[in-house]
Image (cartoon, grey):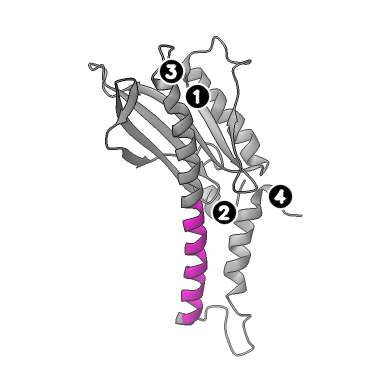
Amino acid sequence: MPHPGKSLLNAILVTAFAFTPALSAEETPGAKMSQEQELAIKQELSRYAVLGQRQILNLTKQATDEYSETLTDSAPNMPSAWMLLEDGSTIKRIDLDGQAEDAPAQIRILMYRAALKSVARRGKIHAATILYTGKLREDSDDEALVIEYEHRLGIAGNKVIPYQIENGKVAYAEPVTSEKPFQIFYDSKADIKGGAN
């Protein structure tokens, strides 16, 4: 019986195979797909890639909007995390404050990763993001917002956005995006290809 947490990944694979016709008696397993079959598979997979990107964009936008409010107050900025539930549209903020009251920011990030990993590995979420602030350089007072994000479809990255507080409002500079290792949904890229979860 398949793990319910793999439902979206399984849907992608089933869809890909649905577009691949069964082999006839004359065809060998090494036979090539027709261009039409290959195109149909690529189109279906691209729909899921677009869906994953949209979900990440919606999740990170809502998380950034909520987190930005904390950047303007005088309290220290502590990490926060959000998750996109398995319905694909409900976004929920994770609350660890009761368990992490005196924990420093680095420990809170680790706690959020562990909590999100637990929920993700049980198939309860499709995407996750953790937001926190840090210095751009050790010798500078310039601050940046860091957005870590992952999606069940194999999307993972970090976005670093320098910011300043101007007249009580957050002003963001151009973001820099980079890939990051998987830490929540998978242990490595090989897990995505092999279906481990």
Foreground mark, 2 or 3, reads 3
Q: Residue furthest left?
A: 139
List the single residue furthest toward the bottom: 26
Q: Residue at 52%, 67% (x, y): give it.
A: 44
Residue 4: mark in rendering: 4
- Residue behind mark 2: 194
Q: Residues within 10 Å of mark 4 (few under 14, many from 20)?
A: few
Query: 92 and 69: which one is in front?
Result: 69
Residue annotated with mark 1: 109
> Sequence order check: which comes first, mark 3 or mark 1?
3
Q: Amino acid at mark 3?
A: Asn
Of callouts 4 and 1, the N-terminal one? 4
Residue 102 horizontal/vertical position (percent): 54, 9
Three-letter amino acid code of the residue under disc 2? Gly
Counting from the top left corner in percent of width and height, residue 159 is at: 37, 37
- The residue where tag 3 is placed is 77
Location of the N terminus by quadrant is bottom right
Q: In the drawing, does residue 99 fall left or right of residue 141?
A: right
Cα–Cα span, label 4 and label 3: 36 Å
Please tell me which residue lies in front, 168 or 130. Answer: 168
Above or below, comparing residue 145 to residue 59 in the picture: above
Say which amino acid is labelled 1: Ile
Q: Is residue 43 magenta?
A: yes
**What amino acid is found at the position of numbered circle 4 in the picture?**
Pro
Looking at the rendered structure, the secondary structure element under dot 3 is loop
In front: mark 4 or mark 3?
3
